Amino acid sequence: MVHKNYSHFDSIPDGSASNRLTEGCLVLEGGAFRGLYTQGLLDTLMLYDINFSCVIGVSAGALGGMNYVSGQIGRSARINIGHRHDDRYVGVRAFMNSHSILDVGFLTEDRGILEPFDRERFGDPARRFVAVATNCETGEATYFDRDTCSDIYLAARASATMPYFAPMVEIDGVPYLDGACSCKIPYEWAFEQGYKKIVVVRTRKADYRSPTTSAGVNSMAQRVYGSYPNLVHSLNAMNAYYNHQCDEIERLHDEGKLYMFAPSEPINIGKVEPDVERLGDLYWLGCYDCMTQIDELRDYIQA
């Protein structure tokens, strides 16, 4: 049953984005249910008729980005907020179906209980979509392009498969986990691909930096994934690399070489946050931050 005992759920916008494209690459950080911030921002971009020609996302960023590419305004928020307490999505039945406490397939598969995902529009060759997952054998990021990978939906599932909480996802015989294990914000890929306009959406405040990996986490990675030494190395190094990425993104934003959105307020949301009021507030914060910066964004795009 959809849970609606929170404010402003019925105000979440709906409808379809236009077919007008904006040249550039949208880079979406993950963060599990912190992704509600990104979903509010993406819905607002669509309402302002800004539909980037390329989207690359990690974990929750990849899942939200799929709905942006399919042009379905509000769909991500209605699912993530409205079904947060549906145990087919988060809970016992999710675990029975996917061996994970959160069934990512709930977002992309047509199970007759959600507004259908527009696969035809998502597959529009005029737009590019890339999901980032971590190759557990090499410990490195793999960039699954919708137009070339064997199953982009499975790749998106892999991108959002949290280490320690869910089993690896096998694609073409190779095991994968959450893209954040190796690359939390894939802005470098966008530069390497030659995009001139790059917009990064973070799910932490601009000044946030992760604590460096503790000995206990090192021990956990070794204990759980000891047969994948390259993955263990990536897990041990990921926070330091993330902090480096954040420093670089701030510098590039200040130099006008990319545009960064980041929450205007601190984000204190759990990975599987149960408080739907807080999730709703986070969605509307993303909407607000986008609206207040829309003129700056347009100036950057048009420069």
Image: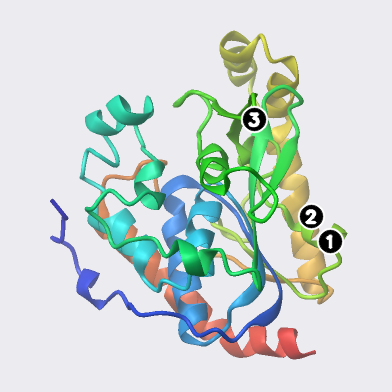
Image marks 1 and 3: residues in contact by CB distance under 8 Å:
no
Amino acid carrying label 3: it is Asp
* Residue type marked 2: Trp
| Above or below, 250 relative to 245 | below
SS of the residue at dot 1? loop
- Using the image as rendered, state which of residue 193 and residue 226 is in the foreground: 193
> Which quadrant of the rendered structure holds the C terminus?
bottom right
Q: Earlier in the sequence, mark 3 or mark 2?
A: 3
| Residue nearest the observer in this picture, 53 or 160 | 53
Of labels 1 and 3, earlier in sequence is 3
Q: Which mark is residue 172?
A: 3
- Residue 194 placement (x, y as % from top left): 86, 66
Q: Which mark is residue 152?
A: none
Question: Could you tell me which residue is drawn at 44 percent across and 78 percent down?
Answer: 288
3D distance between C-alphas at marks 3 and 2: 23 Å
**Residue 237 in view in this figure:** yes
Q: Tell me which colouring the rendered structure shows.
A: rainbow
Q: Which residue lies at the image location 44% right of the left edge and 26% below the top edge?
A: 165
Of the two numbered discs 1 and 3 in the rendering, the one whose residue sits closer to the viewer: 3
Image-based side of 206 in relation to 248, left or right: left
Number of residues whose C-alpha sits closer than 10 Å to that of mark 2, classed few (under 14), some (14–19) or many (20 or more):
some
Residue 264 seen in render: no
Q: Is residue 79 above or below residue 209?
A: below
The x, y position of residue 205, in whole percent, is 57, 59
User: Element under label 3?
Assistant: loop
The quarter holding residue 255 reads: bottom right
Residue at mark 2: 189
Q: CA distance from mark 1 to mark 2?
A: 6 Å
Q: What amino acid type should be assigned to the residue bearing mark 1?
A: Gln
Can you tell which mark lies on residue 193? Answer: 1
